[in-house]
Image (cartoon, rainbow, N blue to C red):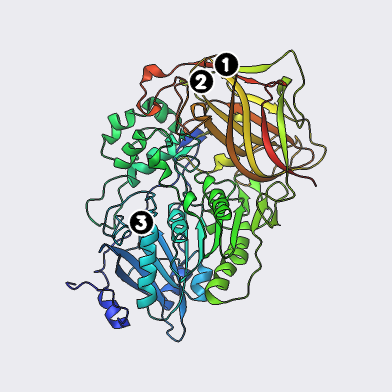
Amino acid sequence: MKKNFNGSPKMSLIKLNLVLLTAISGLTTSPLMAQRGGRSASTAAPARMVNKEDSAYIRNNYKKMEIMIPMRDGVKLYTAVYVPKDETKSYPIMLSRSPYGSGPYGADIYKTSLGPSMIFAKEGFIFAYQDARGRYMSEGDFVATRPYVVKKTNKDIDESSDTYDTIDWMIKNLPHNNGKVGTWGISAPGFYTTMTAIEAHPALKAVSPQAPVTNWFMGDDRHHNGAFQEMGTFAFLSSFGAPRPVPTPISAPAFSAYGTPDGYDFYLNMGPLKNFDDKILHHTNKLWDDMMEHDTYDEYWKSRTPEPHLKNIVPAMLTVGGFFDQEDPYGPLKVNASIEKGGHKDRNILVMGPWYHGGFSRGDGETVGNIQLGSKTGVFYRENIEFPFFMHYLKDAPDPQLPNAYMFETGTNVWKKYSKWPPEEAKQGAIYLQPDNKLAFTAPQANTKMFDAYVSDPAKPVPYSAEIRTIRGSEFMVEDQRFAGNRPDVLVYETEVLDKDVTVAGNVTADLFVSTTGTDADFVVKVIDVYPGDAPDNAALNPAVKMGGFEMLVRGEIMRAKFRNDFGKPEAMVPGKVTEVKWDVEDINHTFLKGHKIMFQIQSTWFPLNDRNPQKFVNIYKANESDFQKATNKVYFTPQYPSHVDVKLIEK
């Protein structure tokens, strides 16, 4: 095809088909999303099975077109469009933009599922899937989490402008559209979805960022509170950050030459972070190198989060996440909160369920790890929340009257509806460390014992999982923590057996008073639900697992102490000086049932989920092996230094 489409709004369906790309045979391979860790043998989860009935339905009821849609700067973006064959009706458009490919590529090769779920395909929508600028078959240069341009000239572009131009073209050119558009996407596509709501096209009526990448330094799967997510980032960027000289339907292969099934050993033997370039990447991966050059929360990172720009949002918003998301627990909570703060014209709804990363989009959702949930949470979400939301805004269906916060409460395993999040009825409380490895809801009193101490050795870090694996996985988010509690470098504190239910609903903040013999340190707090000894053996993954005394991880989070005052201006710890270190542990909605106990585990390594801190005030990305040292860390629990965890409590 020699002639490029000029964007004329009067183009007929026949002419539209003339701009279809030449069919490209073969499927695309998406980059590896889940990554490494462990202790007892495990394998990666099997690929999702193709539903032959769904595939046949799509072929029988939709026709596929491949279009290069022009942007304002002349760059054209590959877009696969599936249009219903029934031309007696008009349809809204569902758009998803992605850096992971919009395959399968080729006009005669169809997706096996359309939309957020097949409910949408069977209802009837126009579905558009677009390769982000510079990825796969789209033209242009790729920039991961491309910064938003506040004051654009006519030629300035960002993900918001690319979406605006795409929607504008589709509304004017796709036949039988009803003039309304919805957007959705999970993970990195969730970031692109968030960006569609900023300076939104007038036709964009409903937006659903799902597990959206939002801030790669503060809480998504590249860093947490400044600590580098080593396992997930290396495996992911080995493909995602690889150069793409020309548009191609093929992704770069992810690194696979681990030489061992044990990711713990692989990452430990790799040594300091700089060795990844020296031994494997050899400075061929610009995105990895960029991360290694920006070791603080500088303008590189600040410019890449949409949070400051979520103001006066016009489309209705449905932001979705999982309380056990191994990759992006930060994103949905902060996107929703930013929109609440910045203002919105229509609804701003938050949904958080008992899911791993993207778990709401697939499967029944009856279990999470070994925990039985008692209902099909994924099915409930797709049928009763997601689908009615888009139907109302795009097809004028009745308003489903969704609450502002639709939250699943684990422990009791019930859905809760709230007018806001955190709920108004949740009162501020705190759980305090006490002597003799105890926890209590009252501050510690004067006692002869002032602290607990442990030796943190970067050469023998605490593993994040008991499994032996090179894929990070997701089950560690609710894994039994008994494997860690017996280590001498893990402090364990727990309440007495609860005489009533205790519900924590909202943000959790760790506030520790600590000292170290080093000049930097990491601290990890894990919030754990300890089951009674006579709990029934009903483990979901493995029936042989004993649930009596099971220590379910409810939430865990790390903090790099040098960022305790400012993530942009690290400060050394003064050896031996008691210092307050406070950090965001993210939100939970969990009831610790009567007869259970609440436990905290505190440690300084969580490997290889997070990189190792040398425990010396240095640029960790450029640290040498000789910089790594043992340190003795102390955690205090006195009236003067009351280490505790702040929680939101709901009285039952």
Q: Position of residue 602 (x, y in %)?
A: 61, 27
- Disc 2: which residue: 573
Query: Which mark is on residue 577?
Result: 1
Q: Give how far apart the Cα atoms at labels 2 and 3 are.
A: 40 Å
- Helix, strand or loop at disc 1? loop
Q: Is residue 6 left or right of residue 488?
A: left
Q: Residue 380, relative to residue 2: is it above or below? A: above
- Disc 3: which residue: 158
Q: Give how far apart the Cα atoms at labels 3 and 1 are.
A: 46 Å
Quadrant where the N terminus is found in the figure: bottom left
Name the foreground residue: 527 vs 270.
Answer: 527
How busy is the neighbourhood of tag 3: few (under 14 within 10 Å), some, or many (20 plus)? some
First in residue order: circle 2 vs circle 3: 3
First in residue order: circle 3 vs circle 1: 3
Q: Position of residue 411 (x, y in %)?
A: 71, 46
Query: Which mark is on residue 48?
Result: none
Residue type pointed to by label 1: Lys
- Helix, strand or loop at disc 2? loop
